[in-house]
Image: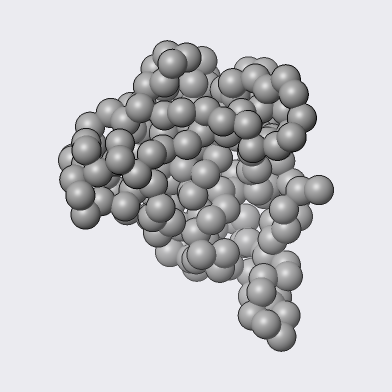
């Protein structure tokens, strides 16, 4: 089964990359913090400093082991140790730091559309061209642990039940999984 990964912003802090930090370290023309399309950064990467913020009104907030933003996963050192081998091949690990310590952004580069893995029978748009439902041909994604799709303008990160199980087994915090691939959680 395929799941969409969402940040659990009701219980955990969300990560933020400042535009100034990106421009100072990666160059003035770099828009890493805003870019949604899959693009490699490993060769020019200089470790960025992240901030964590409260994205919801409730308190207290905890720093997550994993969070999601613009097709990237924040991974704490604990999350990296548990998942690095399983995620290899789907993207690149980009070192980051914060007041809480070091970690990684996992930049997801695998795209379901490149594997012809979009199920046209299950992928539906409404009259405003908004995505109503999204389906994948799971057989074509069997060797792809994490991926994105241009169907949702690369905003979502999707995973198999193997990755969901690995995250849950390692007791990694900060994300929730939804089988409703086109929608956001309530």
| Residue under the image location 41 percent in, 33 percent down | 105
- Looking at the picture, does residue 132 appear above or below residue 141? below
Q: Nearer the viewer, residue 12 or 19?
A: 19
Side of 162 where 11 appears, left or right:
right
Q: Nearer the viewer, residue 89 or 173?
A: 173
Provide residue 13's location: percent of width, then percent of height: 61, 28
Q: Quadrant of residue 22?
A: top left
| Residue under the image location 28 percent in, 28 percent down | 47
In this view, the residue farthest toward the right is: 186
Side of 59 where 45 appears, left or right:
left
Provide residue 181's location: percent of width, then percent of height: 69, 56
Q: How many marks?
A: 0
Q: Quadrant of residue 139?
A: bottom right
Provide residue 149's location: percent of width, then percent of height: 52, 61
Provide residue 183's location: percent of width, then percent of height: 73, 58
| Residue under the image location 64 percent in, 43 percent down | 5
- Whether residue 172 is visible to the viewer of this picture, yes or no, is no
| Residue under the image location 47 percent in, 14 percent down | 100
In this view, the residue farthest toward the bottom is: 127
- Whether residue 30 is visible to the viewer of this picture, yes or no, is yes
């Amino acid at each position: 089964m395929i799941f969409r990964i969402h940040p659990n912003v009701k219980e955990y802090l969300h990560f933020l990359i400042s535009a100034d930090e990106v421009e100072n370290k990666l160059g003035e023309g770099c828009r890493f913090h805003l870019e949604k399309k899959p693009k490699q950064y490993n060769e020019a990467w200089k470790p960025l400093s992240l901030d964590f913020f409260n994205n919801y009104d409730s308190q207290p907030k905890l720093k997550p082991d994993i969070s999601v933003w613009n097709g990237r996963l924040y991974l704490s050192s604990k999350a990296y140790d548990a998942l690095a081998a399983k995620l290899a091949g789907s993207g690149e690990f980009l070192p980051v730091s914060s007041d809480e310590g070091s970690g990684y952004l996992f930049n997801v580069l695998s795209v379901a559309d490149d594997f012809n893995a979009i199920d046209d029978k299950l992928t539906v748009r409404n009259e405003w061209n908004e995505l109503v439902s999204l389906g994948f041909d799971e057989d074509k994604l069997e060797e792809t642990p994490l991926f994105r799709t241009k169907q949702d303008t690369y905003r979502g990160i999707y995973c198999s039940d193997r990755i969901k199980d690995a995250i849950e087994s390692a007791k990694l915090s900060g994300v929730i999984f939804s089988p409703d691939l086109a929608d956001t959680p309530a």
